[in-house]
Amino acid sequence: MMNNTQDNALLRYMHAEDGPVPFDGITTSMYEPAFRLGIDEHNREIDAITACAEAPTFANTIVALERGGRSLNRLAGVFYAMLHANADDELQQVAQRVSPLMSEHSASLTLNRALWQRIKAVNESVDRATLDTEDLMLLDNTVEAFERSGATLEGESRETYRKLIMRLSQLQLDFSRNVLQQTNTYEMWLTAGDLYGLPDSAIEAAHEAARERGKDDAYLVTLHAPSYIAFMKYSTRRDLRERLYRAYNSLCGGTEGSNVDILADIAGTRLEIARLLGHDTFADYRLKRTMAGSTRAVYDLLDNLREVYMPVMRREMSEMTAFAGHDIMPWDYSYYYNKMRDTRYHINDEQLRPYFPLEQVCRGVLGLATRLYGLRFEPNGEAQVWDPEVKVWNVSDVSGSDIGMLYADFFPRETKQGGAWMTCFRDQYTDATGVNRRPHVSLTMNFNRASADKPALLTWGEVRTFLHEFGHALHALLSQVRYESLSCTNVYRDFVELPSQFNENFLLHREFIDTFARHYATGERIPDELLDAILSAERFGAGYSCVRQLSFGYLDMAWHTITAQPQHGDAVAKFEHNAIASVQVFAPVDGCMISPHFSHIFSGGYAAGYYGYKWAEVLDADAFECFEQADDLFDRDLANSLRENILSRGGTKPPMTLYKAFRGREPRIDALLRRDGINNDN
């Protein structure tokens, strides 16, 4: 019964060329049989390619392989999105069973000798002059993907690779599960006397969190971003800030639900995979398919930024210490940063929050795409969603043509990972009949909900986060390519952040802010003196902010440039300390580490790639300077050039080729330094 397409909404969705995800008809029990059916179906498609009696050609092998597995990909797009955004215990248990199946299937695909022989034959015999740019990229990517996934291995090495891939998949799943469970478990219960310094919005959120747990006379602070960030920024209780800091920074580092040994096993397994494939380190393996291209290039970027920003950071910390009147500990930074910023510029997030009700911010962020690219966003109240709070828009262009669907999941819940991200339920592609199938894109964030007497009000930083994730969404929505594996955000990891970080820059300009920022109660725009203050304050703390990001980049590279199996247990803390010593702002705190909850690199897609955020900052500052120098910040010609040369092209050309087509040259670091107010002579 379960495998009957008529009885399973998920199976019908998998096999439909179009249409939104039918969330109302999907139950958790449907996923596992759907994965098994999807894998079987994909295997039959592969068998048809390898059994083809005709000589291997680009069409009957490379394109056929590209179009195979589409049902399985569509299923995975929904499942893994829900695993991060709406994962109860039952779904996590399904993931424990499904992940090995998918890892085994992926390994079996790239280790299929008959398939690899056909791919090699095409690569060696095809007349490349008969293929266009996108065809050539698909061919080269296919060959390289198989080579990088064990296709050239012989003998026992093939089975070793298969086992390593499956082991890595399970380790990453365990790491992610532990982070989610420990984040959800921690609770800091407070009374009214513990709330000094907190703004009304944070107090209301803490009170509401307590009421949800049946305690009407208490207040609850958690490790979820809106709760944690607000408390660390505003609470006058240094002892409670320290308690919360230690709780967050010891996540998964203790005895129960520990990731300490798991992360070492992840790093060690990745090293084994890299060695098996002929590379000295995992970073050497991973960076082959990046703009940076090499470990040396990444360290050059990190080292160069360190030399420029460390003196700036030291001056900032010296000023903060003098302002506070005592040594600054890590649980003090957010608090005194906010106090100093308020004192120096007479501005803080709570002054601005009333001007950023979520509904108006939505209009502003979506309206930016209308002004730049002519997109239209029509609310879709009929679309099925995974949570009642999720919003949906149908997206079209000025001619009324379909561009895609956009989902937005704004608020935290216990089944949801922290942070913010964009994903696609379905990428854009052109099907075999020539129909351009449009993408369905999802934005996930964690903002404070509305209170009893106020709408959901965002901070300045949360508006920036929205713009960032929406930049990723635009990269997907504006995609216009033929092959799904080259569409949307399927680009090099250190290029993928360019559209998102580029989008953030508009928040630094009054012309954009004035299009949507209005006080939720009075309708008044942000007063000139308040807006001038916030724009002046943007460079405040630039040194610390950069050095903090560099520490994550160095830590990531350290774990992925190891040449021997890492030690476990207490050695992990020592390894981390040594990795970030050159950019260490604070002395290490006993029991606190980054690595055990560093999901980006241990269970996300940023292994040996976290530097990409800084790499993309160089790109986005350089790219945005064109708009700042234009007569109109929303210059349509520049926007069209960005759209045509970057946003619509996906991974159909090398990233530097795409960037140079837009900018006319390679990027320079000067614009980033100017934006941060940094004198390169520092």
Image (cartoon, helix red, strand yellow):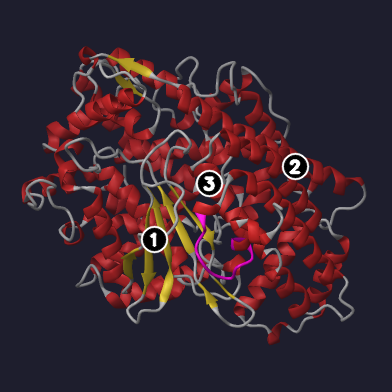
Q: Is residue 34 left or right of 45 when viewed as pictured? A: left
* Most common secondary structure along the magenta stretch: loop
Q: What residue type is labelled 3?
A: Met
Element marked by disc 3: helix
Compute the Cα span from label 1 to label 2: 40 Å
Under circle 1, the secondary element is loop
Q: Where is residue 582 in the image (x, y as percent from the top left)?
A: 47, 31
Residue 6, percent across and down? 65, 61
* Residue labelled with disc 2: 166
Q: Which amino acid does label 2 sit on?
A: Met
Q: Which residue lies furthest to the bottom in this view?
A: 130
Q: In this view, does 3 lie to the left or right of 87?
A: right
What range of the chain is rendered magenta? 13-23
In depth, the one of 620 and 397 nearer the eye is 397
Going by the numbered disc 1, the residue's amino acid type is Glu
Which residue is the site of mark 1? Answer: 382
| Residue at the (87%, 81%) spot, across then down | 54
Residue 227 on the magenta span: no
Q: Identify the residue at horizontal 57%, vertical 29% (top origin).
A: 178
**Residue 478, picture quadrant:** bottom left
Q: Is residue 573 found left or right of 379 in the rendered image?
A: right
Q: Are marks 2 and 3 in contact (CB under 8 Å)?
A: no
CA distance for labels 1 and 3: 20 Å
Q: Which quadrant would residue 533 be assigned to in this image?
A: top left
Residue 195, relative to residue 314: is it above or below? above
Question: Upstream in the sequence, badge 1 or badge 3?
Answer: 3
Residue on which disc 3 sits: 82
